Amino acid sequence: MPQDIRRYLKLLPGNYLATRCAVAGGPAYCVPLTAHYPATFYVVVASNFSDMTVALAVPDVIVARAQAGDEAALEALYRAFETPVYNLVRRILRRPEDAEDVLQETFLEVVRNLKQYRGEGHLWGWIRRIATTKALMRIRRDQVRETESLDDEPGKPGMHVGANIDLERAFDRLSETSRAVVWLHDVEGYTHEEIAEQMGKTVSFSKSQLARAHARLRGMLDEGAQA
Amino acid sequence: MMHCTMEDLGALRAGEASVWARRHVTTCAACQAELEVLYQRVAQLKALPALHPPRDRWPAIHAALRAVRSRRRRTWGTWTGSLALAATIAAVLLVQPPGGEQGKLHAELSQAKQQSATLEDSLQQYDIDGRVLSGHAAALVAELEDRISILDGTLAQREQSVRDAELVKLWQERVGLMRELVNARATRARYVGL
């Protein structure tokens, strides 16, 4: 099984085996997601091995129940999306406690506005947009934290940057704005236009932030390799 | 010799590069290698392991949702209760002008309602919708709100038949619960957002 699919399987609670099943748009690899809905609640792991489409699929009936206020369905939605949402906002935000807060705020807003979701577009896309907006709002609110110093990593005073640095640690050292642009563009697949709109900045800003961030990553990784 | 900048490499990756960059990268081994490194780095970013939330946040979310629902019910109950109560008081006043023991009860009833309204206003100042409580605190608040909601239901149903003395008692009980609720909100406010 390709690495990307394995990675997404790790998002799932428990050890579920993917099975091939039919979903809109063609055959997909799906996994039953929770014990609450073993037969109907699936995550689509891959619908096409060539382009590695990965998406979380939630049956309409679960969404409808959640929209009606069914608490079991609301929890099922939370269980389905808690890790993707947390992973997204944690990659953007430097502090884990901020990411936890945004996770909670995101789901409270999801529940508040779930009736407005009309099924147009993927539910994950809708939730992801809420989560991204909240993470970016937090960055704006806490601009004072927005530094790009390489020597002030929280909890690790005096640690030298160069030694044995890997990509994840180098990424952690970027500013939150840079992290947001890199993650949204390179991993989540946002366009510069979408990033600019969500950040309230220009497309040029998004492009230059991305280039700067990659230049910094390159520099840190080179430095680490030479150390 | 001029090489591609990181902006050029990003544009090449996106298929939006200038003519010069597209030509240059076909002849420059260094820039080809740099572009390959960029591709690899993006692939490595995509392959980073998923980060899981360190704590289960559902209990806190669930408690907050219950609190919101309970408050909505209570608000509705308060409205219906208040309207019906106003009608009852008007009817009583028409039949029996206040005075003596009856006047005292009316004064106590009026005072309890005033206190209740003041506490409602105080509660609004805590910006409940903009805050998130811990699971434990939210459970406590939800319980208080449920009790107030039940009491409002009782007031709405029984105010037509209940004697003034009992009505005063019910309203005073409501004031007590509201006071507890305000205290719970106020003391837990420090822990909001943790």
Image: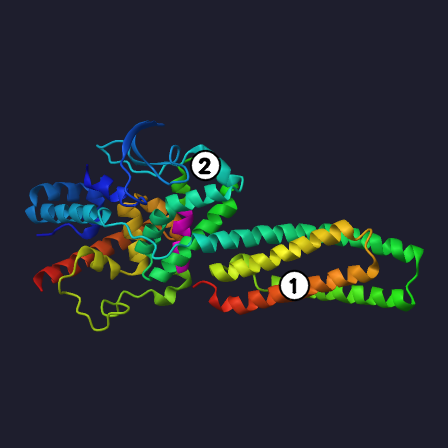
Numbered circle sitting on residue B41: none
The part of the image, by quadrant, that contains residue A14 is top left
Q: Is residue A3 visible?
A: yes
Q: Chain of mark 2?
A: A
The part of the image, by quadrant, that contains residue A81 is top left
Judge left or right: residue A171 versus residue B159: left
The amino acid marked with disc number 1 is Met
Q: Secondary structure at mark 1?
A: helix
The amino acid marked with disc number 2 is Ile
Q: Secondary structure at mark 2?
A: helix
Closer-to-camera residue (A160/A18): A18
For the residues bearing labels 1 and 2, Cβ distance under 8 angstroms? no
Numbered circle sitting on residue B178: 1
Numbered circle sitting on residue A62: 2
Q: Are marks 1 and 2 on the same chain?
A: no
Report the residue at 29% width, 61% height from top.
A175
Q: How crowded is the residue under tag 2: few (<14 C-alpha within 10 Å), some, or many (20+)?
A: some
Judge left or right: residue B133 versus residue A91: right
The part of the chain drawn in magenta is: A128-138
